[in-house]
Image (tube, rainbow, N blue to C red):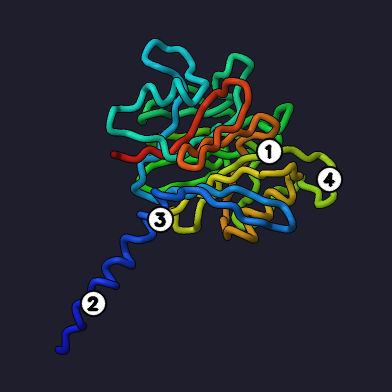
Amino acid sequence: MKMKPIWARLFAALALVVPRVALAADPCHTVTFEDTPFTVCEARAGDDLRLWLRDDAGDILGTIPRLKATLAPNEQLVFAMNAGMYAPDRSPAGLYIENGQELHRIVTNEGPGNFGLLPNGVFCISDRFAVVESRAFAANPLACRFATQSGPMLVIDGALHPRFLPESDSTYIRNGVGVSGDGLTAWFVISDKPVNFHRFARFFRDQLGAPNALYLDGSISRLFVPAQGRADFGLPMGPIVGLVAQD
């Protein structure tokens, strides 16, 4: 059997590691879809993706500086964003699981506001990622290390939420999360200009190819990318999702 030249073997090995290096150096990028810019931050199965709500004293973190203060000395925050809807006291509106512990129960009934615009859903972090419709999750829960419930679902098995209207004039800066069909990639997206639900959902389905995607919030949407100097201004948040890297 003929061996490949050493340069060819080195090139092949580098091809396997370069994407991970590129992600660490530039975790988020801008994609223009139908004349609207969206910032996309990507996490992959095996990455240290976490949810945060409270500090050791039981107080809601709410801000990135307070979140960063909980990290170990050798840990860096790669990116973070608000991670689902919350009550006026900033407690989760629905299911919330942190480090395998359920801190708030799932809510499956229809209600007011975007959260109650069924179907809503759950974003689950385990050895892979999943976005699951809430009633399906309640009937057959996944073993999530972290999970947050929000709503409405943006994309459900390849279909847009049935209540979204293409010409809706309800536009906001919006953020959400979509998951690849194999569960190995999660895309965290924020629109950099106001968009309606229909266009936001189509970005996940038609641009990213996500068969399932979940709305996280609208007017309070915020993204933090320290390597890019991005720190969106706004009031303290409820649940926060973020990617952590080791020094």
- Of circles 2 and 4, the one toward us is 2
Mark 3 and mark 1: Cα distance apart in space: 38 Å
Q: Are marks 2 and 3 in contact (CB under 8 Å)?
A: no
Q: Are marks 4 and 3 in contact (CB under 8 Å)?
A: no
Write down the residue under mark 3.
22
In the image as oriented, which residue stretches furthest toward the bottom? Answer: 1
Of mark 2 and mark 4, the one earlier in the sequence is 2
Residue count near mark 1 (Cα–Cα under 10 Å), binned few <14, some 14–19, many ≥20: many
Of mark 4 and mark 3, the one earlier in the sequence is 3
Mark 4 and mark 3: Cα distance apart in space: 37 Å
- Of circles 2 and 1, the one toward us is 2
Q: How many marks?
A: 4
- SS for callout 1: loop
Query: For the residue marked with disc 3, what is the amino acid?
Result: Ala
Write down the residue under mark 1.
118
Write down the residue under mark 2.
7
Of mark 2 and mark 1, the one earlier in the sequence is 2
Q: Are marks 2 and 4 in contact (CB under 8 Å)?
A: no
- Of circles 4 and 1, the one toward us is 4
Mark 4 and mark 1: Cα distance apart in space: 18 Å
Write down the residue under mark 4.
168
Residue count near mark 2 (Cα–Cα under 10 Å), binned few <14, some 14–19, many ≥20: few
